[in-house]
Amino acid sequence: MTWSVLQIVFVGVLGLFAIGLYGLLVTRNLIKIVVVLQILVKSTLIALVLAGKASGQINLSQSLVTTVIVVDTVVAVIALALAVQVQVRCGTLDLKDLSKLRG
Amino acid sequence: MTVESSIEVPGVLYFIIVINAVLSALQAIRASRLLASAFWLAGVSVWTSMILYLLGAPEVAVIELSVGAGLVTVLFAFAISIAGEATLDLPSLIPKPLTWVLFILVLLLLGWLAWPVSGANPPLTEPAYADVLWGQRSLDMWMQIAIIFAGALGVLGLLAEGKSPIRKRPQQPDQEVEP
């Protein structure tokens, strides 16, 4: 069986998505969760370009990917800022410890 | 312009790049130190940008390379230097069997839905990237400006780590009034 280029890349998208999904389910560290989210978004970026290539509208997919990159970066910045503030105020980055906190 | 119009890239190269991206992502998840995890994530960004370039999207490949492998990595290093390294070998909150069931279910559904689409390869007959970006999606650009402003505020939050949330004011003895 011969795979096309798009099918090879699609398997890579599935691999990255799988790793991101698994990491999101098992990770408890706040900063590590941001890393995992970044991996998930990268798989989505490739999937968007792949869809554009498969439908013959790669420039439209590029404009969408530009928006996704900007939003993803801002999400990372704000999430990291929140994680740092949580570490400064509560002294932990563990989700389980945070869920036990009572105001 | 597409890459394939000028250079014929062999499928083996795609395979090698995809494998490297997946392995880098795996290392980013498995790394025991946060800083190492951030650097492996930068590696994922590099391989991702190479895939995007080879697929015929050079504009976003450059943006991904500069933002994903550059800016975000610096932000991670900065945040980790403030927050410090923490223990990463904590057990999962979700039971492992449930994790694997969800994992396999999502992968099977995604593969089943999207695999037929990846076989298509129609000719590219659409306007240029700049026309699409500034003509068809100009509203997105305005939204992105607003979101970048929110990101700038987020950076201010990141830099405000030195301020303690609650500070008791020291009592000044000269202001105490005796009854």
Image (cartoon, coloured by chain):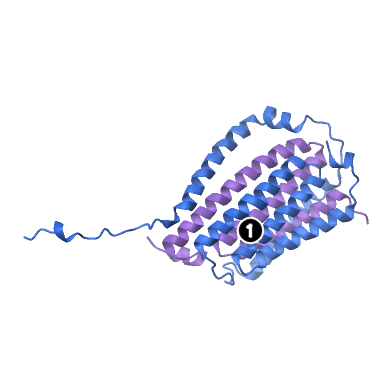
Quarter assignment of residue B86: bottom right
Whole-percent x, y for residue B6 in the image: 89, 40
Outermost residue toward the left?
A: B179
Q: Is residue B106 left or right of residue B145?
A: right
Using the image, determine if residue B78 lies above or below residue B84: above
Residue located 77% across and 46% down the image = B52
Chain the render paints purple: A
Using the image, determine if residue A74 lies above or below residue A87: above
Whole-percent x, y for residue A77 in the image: 55, 50
Q: Which residue was labeled with disc 1? A: A36
Outermost residue toward the top?
A: B135
Residue located 42% across and 60% down the image = A89
Residue located 68% across and 66% down the image = B100
Chain the render paints blue: B
Whole-percent x, y for residue A78 in the image: 53, 50
Q: Is residue B163 left or right of residue A33?
A: left
Report crowding for label 1: few under 14, some 14 to 19, many 20 or more residues within 10 A (C-alpha). Answer: many
Residue located 16% across and 61% down the image = B173
In the foreground, A46 or B34: B34
Mark 1 residue type: Val
Quarter assignment of residue B28: bottom right
The chain that hosts pointer 1 is: A
